[in-house]
Image (cartoon, coloured by chain):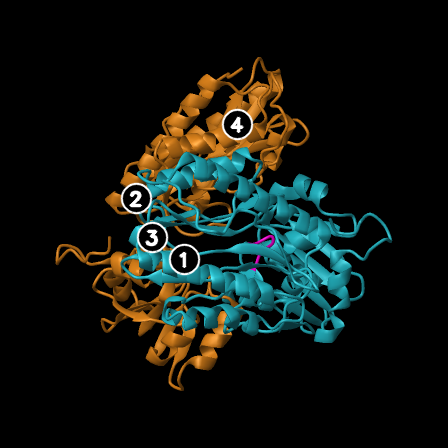
Chain colours: A cyan, B orange
Amino acid sequence: MSGADGASAPSRADRLAQRLPERELDALLVSDLVNLRYLTGFTGTNGLALVGADGERTFLTDFRYLDQAEAQVPAEFAQIRGKESLLEDVAPRLAGRVGFDDEHLTVKAHEQLGAAVGEGVALVAAGGLVEELRAVKEPSEIERIARAATIVDEALGALAEAGLAGRTERAVALSLERDLCERGAERESFPIIVAGGAHGALPHASPRDEPIPSGSLVIVDLGAIVEGYCSDCTRTFATGALDGEAAEVYALVLAAQERALQAVRAGAGVVEVDAVAREAIADGGHGERFGHGLGHGVGLEVHERPRLSPRGEGTLAAGNVVTVEPGVYMSGAFGVRIEDLVVVGEEGPEVLSGFPKALVTVA
Amino acid sequence: MSGADGASAPSRADRLAQRLPERELDALLVSDLVNLRYLTGFTGTNGLALVGADGERTFLTDFRYLDQAEAQVPAEFAQIRGKESLLEDVAPRLAGRVGFDDEHLTVKAHEQLGAAVGEGVALVAAGGLVEELRAVKEPSEIERIARAATIVDEALGALAEAGLAGRTERAVALSLERDLCERGAERESFPIIVAGGAHGALPHASPRDEPIPSGSLVIVDLGAIVEGYCSDCTRTFATGALDGEAAEVYALVLAAQERALQAVRAGAGVVEVDAVAREAIADGGHGERFGHGLGHGVGLEVHERPRLSPRGEGTLAAGNVVTVEPGVYMSGAFGVRIEDLVVVGEEGPEVLSGFPKALVTVA
């Protein structure tokens, strides 16, 4: 996982270390558990890594995870058994300008760390360094994400066979959850959304014990985890003949989604890609009803960098894996969201989501 | 949920407000989502509350959760539609000494908040205020935790019928997860641990695709969530006749667990209760092999206050709900952990876990 297999490629920790001088850092303390997993493979709930520009590679965990760390963390890291406060255990090892995860470390933990370090140590806010590495996926990461996306495609196919109308949202969500696991997922990547009729107008609806109505729209938003990597996909199904407005909104969202997909390529600005969908929906008269960003990166976390949003920053890079998911939410009536997961390439997107986007009616 | 139903009892927000003067605070900004749920009932993923000693009760969320907040958050809170950075939206409303969740707020968010507030505002680290309220459960909370505990008892009973030896750890964990949901849980309260043989020596083992051996011990640690409230229970099963050491260690852990249970009562020091089990295990010659705390509070989170540990602080209070879970981990051989969930009472514990603790053999 982290190039312990020889000189063929620099490890993730090595690539991180190479980026320290540009931030004028002597070392980076990695405390966020997802960043830690990315760098070291460690999947426990208490660990810390110190990566130095000078070659320091130290990993700390407590008693509970020693055997696990031995098995997971590559030999480039020296392993130290800490007590429960790993920040206090690592403090004596720090020297110079030491970056920390300010996007993750709490104010309290930062204060404890500050009280424990020696005189010459400067703690420097340095969030995002590992996240920036994570945003550009390696082939082995894309392969896992693609498997997680395929599992969702299959589960949606089975759902279309099993039917929707008359089942409760909760029963559908629960059966999807099981189905993901039976098809090889570790688990779902977030609580599955099944939102029928007016409930679909809440973009983050929780499944209810309410039967899904006929002749309406149902938003189904789900993802799987395969070897730690997430997928994310939304489809909106019809449960019978729709009135004109629902069908029109569906067509509008689909057109916006497909136009935005065509804009996804290396070098495209995240604000500009978002704007492609946003303008299409505004032109259709529903600009006020698309209140969230167009998409987000997906990897070890279901929401990570980059962010496709009017408030995002920067450009897409080849190897980013992002969602493209415009939606229109008609308060009190219904919602439509259509979401694909795509790999950003030099020439355009490679779409990982394979389930049809033309309106599927599932009675 | 939060006394909007009249003058009968002060709401949780009112009880929080009553505690602000002792910390010399004019208001508390509640940003942690679990604390927010406790105070307001809100279950979305972006929200913020401001509770003032002067009666201010403000709740902020973004576009995605407006309908949900309308339905969940009681009328004592004025609701404001924020943008995506709720901290920046709330900043102009702050005045005087304003506490914040320093145990949860990140260094970066704190800096953003500091940059956005007006001149006369002092941001004061005030973590733990809501957590201290949460640690003492109301009857309605205990009732939900008890239901979550009963679901686990039933699932363990079904597991004892279904068998363990020869099934993979992962298959057992997956079937337990389903079973919890079928019995009415929202979901499991943490990733279920099923750890057979030597794998049981890792206190936080992840289930593997490995068959559970016969004639060994298997640690099964699981919890359910009912209406947001967690349970937590561990049993160690035998999968056939055990060698003498495994049986002895089981008996030692059970004796330590039962002695510690007897020490659980209002007013008992958390360090002292922990020490009861720790000394019993040390007397049995395995003191070095019990490397974690005796237990922890359980409620909206599966780990919350109080903490029963050599490094814990304070005393137990009536209405605390805690685990009592000593373990002994024999590296390379097996592990034993036995965990009950108990309500702290004036005279002793009310044990919510009902599955037998005498060694159960499940072939």
Q: Quadrant of the C terminus of chain B?
A: top right
Residue A209 spot, x, y in % from top left: 30, 42
Residue B184 spot, x, y in % from top left: 34, 34
> Of A254 and B285, which appears nearest the observer?
A254
C-beta proximity under 8 Å, tags 1 and 2:
no
C-alpha distance separating marks 1 and 2: 17 Å
- The reply to whether the magenta stretch includes residue A341 is no
Q: Quadrant of the rendered structure where residue A124 is?
A: bottom right
C-alpha distance separating marks 2 and 4: 37 Å
The residue lying at 68 percent from left, 69 percent from top is A98
What label sits on residue B134 in the rendered view?
3
What label sits on residue B172 in the rendered view?
4
> Of A3 and B288, which appears nearest the observer?
A3
Instruction: Please tell me whether mark 4 sits on a helix, a strand or a loop.
Output: helix
Stretch in magenta: A297-301
> Of B92 and A225, which appears nearest the observer?
A225
Can residue A187 be spotted in the picture? no
Which residue type does callout 2 highlight? Ser
C-beta proximity under 8 Å, tags 3 and 2:
no
- Label 2 sits on residue: A214
Residue B147 spot, x, y in % from top left: 31, 35
